Image (spheres, rainbow, N blue to C red):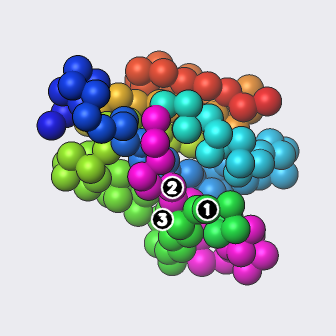
Amino acid sequence: MGLLGRLLDGSEAVRVGLFVDGPNVLRSEFDVDLSDVRDAAETRGHLVVTRLYLDEHASPGLIQAAEANGFEVVTTSGDVDVKLAVDATALVAEDAIDVLAIASRDTDFKPVVEAAARRNVRTFAIAPGEYGRSDALRTAAHDAVTLE
């Protein structure tokens, strides 16, 4: 049952998948708090997936802090963007989420957002700050917010 059916019959909460591009969001110049990212995504529904993607050089302290904030941490030795995009697209294809929330400043996720929209999944772009906002990603998404 798609989002429209869920909203019309009220049988289930809107399922949100939150995907955070760690290397592009958790930069010192943005001073982003993961709880703010989580709070922004929760305005769209019930979080059923909350993932933070990091590269293999992420500090144990960052991983521990993210897990303490309820994030599933995914580390990869390859390209973080590719892993996030594949995982997000898979959940959309499996009809596992009604809203795809991506926290990033990277235009590379525009095709993922567009593919989700074609499958009637609402999309939500979360930018880490005015300086870190991708206008292309914001424009492709149904909704967007810039963290301050």
3 or 1: tag closer to the N-terminus: 1
Camera-nearest label, 3 or 2: 2
Residue 145 vertical position relative to residue 104 in the rendered view, above or below: above
Camera-nearest label, 3 or 1: 1
In the rendered picture of this protein, how many numbered marks are placed on residues?
3
The quadrant of the picture occupied by the C terminus is top right
Residue to which mark 3 is pinned: 79
Question: What is the x, y in percent for residue 64?
Answer: 71, 75
Specify start and end residues of the magenta stretch as a single range. 45-65
Q: What's under tag 2, amino acid-wise? A: Thr
Q: What's under tag 1, amino acid-wise? A: Gly
Label 2 close to label 1 by CB (< 8 Å): yes
2 or 1: tag closer to the N-terminus: 2
* Towards the viewer: 137 or 33: 33
Residue drawn at (54%, 73%) of the image: 75
Residue to which mark 1 is pinned: 70
Label 3 close to label 2 by CB (< 8 Å): no
Q: Is residue 59 magenta?
A: yes
